[in-house]
Each structure stands twice: as structure tokens, then as C-alpha cells.
Amino acid sequence: MMSGHSDESQDVPDPATGNPAVEYYLRLYVAGQSPNCVRAVDNLTRLCEEHLPGQYRIELIDLVENPTLARGDEIVAVPTLVRRLPPPPRKIIGDLSQTENVLAGLQLPEAGG
Amino acid sequence: MAGGASLPVPPGVPDGVSGNAPDGVLLREQILDLEKRLHAIRAGGIDSVVLGGPDRESVFALTNTSRTYRAIAENMGEGAATVSERGVVLYVNLMLAAMLAGDRRHLVGAPVTDMFGAADQSTVSGLLAVAPGATTRAEANLRRRDGALVPVLLAATCLDLEGVLVRCLIATDLTARKEAEDALARGRRELERRSEELERSNRDLEQFAYVASHDLQEPLRMVSSYTTLLAEDLGDSLDDTARRHLDFAHDGAARMQQLVSDLLHYARVSRGADTGRQRVDCDQLVETATVDLHEAIAAAGATVTHDPLPTVTGMRTEIEQLFTNLVGNAVKFRGEEPVRVHVSAARDGPMWRFSVADNGIGIDPAQAETIFDVFRRLHKPGSYPGTGIGLAICKKVVEHHGGRIWVESQPGTGATFRFTLPAADNDQVD
């Protein structure tokens, strides 16, 4: 029922998973539970809750489980955040602790809404 | 931590433009150098990189040095997950994904609370508030995608990863245990229900027997009295046939009175429960029984002997009845030989095991169980007197005291009745 991992070109949320279509589709590449990766997860979650409530979906990809997934987005370091939607794709490397840099990198408005 | 959102710069790369070479050439060399390093990393020729920080050097492993632990976590028989401080699932092992019947791709990155039903949210929140170094445990239900609940035992620990706290959650499937417990509880309830039913029906029966036998006594006394009066009134005017019929009626009433009286006696055993428990000296009781049975013993030319007998705990009147009935039986069912009855006792755990042995007509082993039933007679009325309730009373008395009674015998070789009674508390074990 779900699309496999190999189907990396699929940016539109799969209707079979029940995920509603969202404006911001963010993919966070991590490698296991290293400190910067864990921090990146929580920083991104907080940032999205504050600035993109209800408009985002985060996909967490652990490259330890499947390193070949790094190829699709040409990941060379983790953690890396990739904005899949809206186009064009944009990448930010690091633990996402500097909110202004992340917002600028993603070209998001400074305040929520 | 003020980690910048930028790729760390390898050592050896100058901040700006310097040296004698033209700027563009130097820059290109530096870029080429960087590309070579990047290529080496991507080609897998490097295990770790060493980076200089503001305070100290750090080593970053590029190959996964914790692969063995990962493999263990992946393949273990319990569900495992790691959760970030904000409650985001970072990792789910194969077992937990299977327990949740879910795709790991959707479980990872989602709030951990999505794994649990609404009723367990506060339990899980409390569990995850565990401090570093501690472990908390609680039972909860995993909620699968199809809505089914899976009972689990959760154990949460907190790891401090260089200032970042990560919670590890271990989930043990309790489905099989819960099912076994439920089956056991169902069985126990059913057993209790049946036991209550039996007790109630037993109480009802005893009540009925008591009321019936009690209420039957008065009308029977009337029948008996008036047949006697009738015989006196009519006197000589009765012919032989009429007199014989009247005698039958009178005898029948008398026998029925005896039956009713015995039944009442039987019903009275254990009525009013255990209020009268006391220390009972069996030596003395057997002496009393022998005196009570004096006439029957003398008539049978019987000899009743006994060893020194112990003290038991119980209802004196009931135990006296027990000995009287058993010794009386032994005297009654005599064979050709002069009757000899011997009473003895041996210790058997918390009980005393008594034996009443005779050299009478004996009992067919096939009847060994049924002789203790109410109104069970092995012989025709007339061959031996009695209503057949004596042994039923004995059984009820013994069972009322938590003991058991049985008979060992062969026809023609006498019978030995054995029964157990609880020893008095401070009795010395022989």
C-alpha cells in the first residue's frame, strides 16, 4: 500500500498513507542518534510548530539504515535538511539551532502564519 | 550549543586571499584540494575525520562503528524506540514496527504519542519524563494503525548524548500473558460460581431435610397415637385380619417415626456451624459410648477394647455420636464368632487417624463407598435393625471436621472403619 523507499521522486504526499497535502514538505537526513542529528530533529519540529502550523510535513530519513537514500538528494553530510516542497529544492546543513538562518534558508516568513 | 548551520571548514584553508600566487590560482588549488578530500570521503577510503574545534580536536567516525549494537537492537525480540526531548520518534526497531503493524518510514519522525491510545497519553508522558540514569516502567497499550490495541510493558531510560537527552523505550508484548491471565481469571470465576451454586443447593437441601423431618414428626405421632387408641377402643370386636392390618399400620408409623428422627439427627449435624469446637478427649468418649451401648454389647457378648486415644479438636456431641455409631455397628453386624471390637489411633500429619476394627460379617469392597449414603442398607429390613443412616451421620461428622472416612474389609473377615480428625493444637506427635 505504501510507496517503497526507492521511489524518491515522489514529492506529492501519498494518499494511501492518509497524509494530507501540505505546502511545506521537509526531509531531514540524519545518521543514527548523534547529538547534532537529535538536536536538528527537535529544532526543526519546534520551528515548524511555531512558523508553519498545519502546513508542513517532516520526513525523517536515517541514513544508517539505508545509506543509498543519500544519493537522491546528494547528501554529503548529516544532518541535512532538504526542502522538497515548494520548489526549488533547498538544503541546510547543521543542527538547525540558528532559527533566523534556517528561516532565511527555507525562505520562510519570520513570524507564524 | 552554538553550532553554526554551515559545513565545517577543513584545517589548512586560509580565511582570505594571501601569498604570492595570483588569487584565482590559489583559490582553484584550494577548491581542488577540497574536492579531493570530499571524493576520498565519498569513495569510502576514510573511516574518520579529525576536525579542529575552538577548544579541542574532535574525531568523527564516518563508518558506522556502532553497527553491532544496532544489529542487536534491530533483531531483538522486544520493541525498541528512541525518542527526542520533544517527543519525536528517532528510531524504531523491526519488532516495534511489527507490533504496531506499521511502516518504519511513517513511524520515525512522528510524535511518539501517535503510537499509543488516548487513554495512555499521560502514562507515556510520565514515563518519558525519566531522569538521566534512571529507568521508569509502566503498562500501556500500543495502538496499531488499524486501531487494535496491543498491551505492553514499557521501560524508559534516558541517555545524555553530549548535552542532548534521548529517551530509549523498550516495549515487551504482554498479549500472551494477558490472555493466559484472563483465561485463568475466567476459570477461577467459573469455579467460584459453581462452588457457590453447590454450597447453596447443599444448604437448601439440608434446610429442606431439617424442616421436612421436623414437621413430619407431629402428624406421625398422631397416626401412631390414634392407631394405638383405635386398637384399644375396638378391642375384642376386631377379627384377626383387621387386627393384623392395624398392626401393620402401627408398625409402619413407628418405622417412619424412626426414619424421620434419624433424618432430623442427620440434618442437625453441622447446622449452626463451628461454634462448639473444643478439645475432645477420645479416651473418655469411647468409654462413654461403651456405657451407652452397654445393653447391645452385653446382648451380643461382645468385647470392646481400645488403645490410649489422643485428644482432638471438634464438636464433642458429634464425635461422641461418631464413636457410638461405629462401635454400635460393629456390635450389630456380628458373625459366628464372639464379637471383638478394637479402637486405635495413629498420627497422620495434622490429623489423627482412628481405626475401629471388628471381626464381624465384613463388607463387600464394591459397597465400600455407598455404605456411607443416607438410608443405604446392605441387608433386608428385619435381618438387622436400624434405618441405615448411622454411617451417613458418621461421614457427615468426619467431613464437618475436615477429615475423611473409609472402610477396609472383605466379606467374612471383619471390617475396619478408619477416619481422620484434627489433632488438638498442642498435641505431641508420637
Image (cartoon, grey):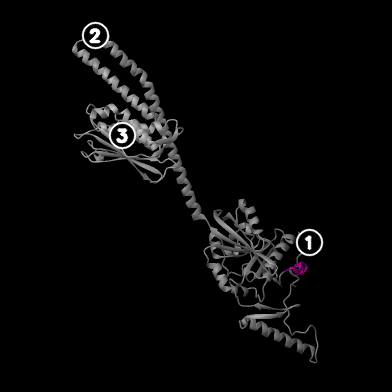
Above or below, A71 relative to B341: below
Disc 1 target residue? A111
Tag 1 near tag 3, CB within 8 Å? no
Q: Main secondary structure of the magenta part?
A: helix
Which chain does the residue under circle 2 lie in?
B
Closest to the camera, between mark 1 and mark 3, is: 3
* Element at label 3: helix
Identify the magenta region: A96-104
Q: Amino acid at mark 3?
A: Leu
Q: State the separation of the CA atoms marked 3 and 2.
A: 42 Å
Q: Nearer the viewer, residue B144 or A53?
A: B144
- Residue at left 35%, top 17%? B219
Residue pictured at 52% horizontal, 67% vertical: B75
Say whether residue A98 is magenta: yes
- The residue tagged 2 is B235
Q: Nearer the viewer, mark 2 or mark 1?
A: 2
> How far from the left and from the top, in percent, is residue B142?
57, 56
* Both marks 2 and 1 on one chain: no
**Chain identifier of the residue bearing label 3 in the image:** B
Residue neighbourhood size for the residue with mark 1, other residues' Cα within 10 Å, grouped as few (<14), some (14–19), many (≥20): few
Is disc 3 on the same chain as disc 1? Answer: no
Q: Position of residue A83 (x, y in %)?
A: 69, 68
Position of A91 relative to B322 (above/below): below
User: To which quarter of the image does residue B284 belong?
Assistant: top left
Circle 1: element type: loop
Q: Label 3: which residue?
A: B326
> Which amino acid type corresponds to the residue marked 1 in the rendered image?
Ala
Q: Looking at the picture, tell me which residue is in the foreground, B83 or A10.
A: B83
Q: Which of disc 2 and disc 3 is earlier in sequence?
A: 2
